[in-house]
Amino acid sequence: QTYEKNIDAILNNEYDFSLLKKYNYCYTPNGYFWKKDKQTIFSELMESIYDERVSVQKKLKTCKEEVKHSLDIYQHALKILLNSGYGVFTNEYFRYYDKRIAEGITVTGQCVIKYINDALSKKIKGVKGIYGDTDSTFVSCAEYVKSLNCVSENEIINRLIEFSDSKIGKVLNKSFEE
């Protein structure tokens, strides 16, 4: 079953979600509402693993070169553990099997990816979001590059790096805050 129409409706603000906050619910694009007042032991565990991964990723940015490889392996192992943890809900032999949760996670991810690609395309002139997955978003900057009037490939590359840091990164960060 595809939920593309529901994702589009969410991204086009066709739903009024104001009551969700008032009554402490969330909504997943597969059509389910979830109460947010209690956290399960499983969600506490996943949150703890996620927080640990975020912490390790921050350390990776400032650590000494000799520990960088070990930290990277560790954060990657945490990522695999998180993905497996969410995926286990699709296993009918798992004690807490719930297809609604597995679908909700997957479809919410698809919604976020589409949102990011749309935000990049709408908010940055010369950029078009063309593909996204759980780890990355691919954009075309062809229109932006045409507008540069650069002489060399190195100049184009340097301008794209600067553009990515100054514009694309800011739009991505702001989009996640929204």
Image (cartoon, grey):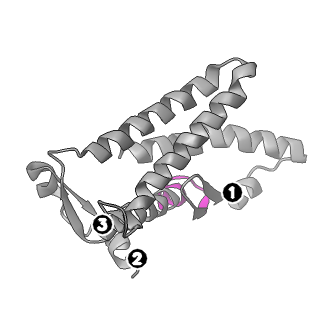
Q: Mark 3 = which residue?
A: 98
Q: Residue at x 11, y 56 (%)?
A: 19
Q: Mark 2 = which residue?
A: 4
**Relative side of 127 to 81, left or right:** right
Asked if disc 1 and disc 2 are in contact, CB closer than 8 Å, the reply is: no
**Separation (CA) of disc 1 from disc 3:** 41 Å
**Relative side of 23 to 91, left or right:** left
Q: How many neighbours does mark 2 have within 10 angstroms: few (below 14), some (14-19), or many (20 or more)? A: some
Foreground: 42 or 167? 42
Element type at marker 2? helix
Label annotation for residue 82: none
Determine if the magenta segment contains residue 124.
yes
Of the numbered discs 1 and 3, the one sitting upstream in the chain is: 3
Farthest residue, direction right: 152
Foreground: 84 or 156? 84
Q: Mark 1 = which residue?
A: 141
Q: What residue type is labelled 1?
A: Cys
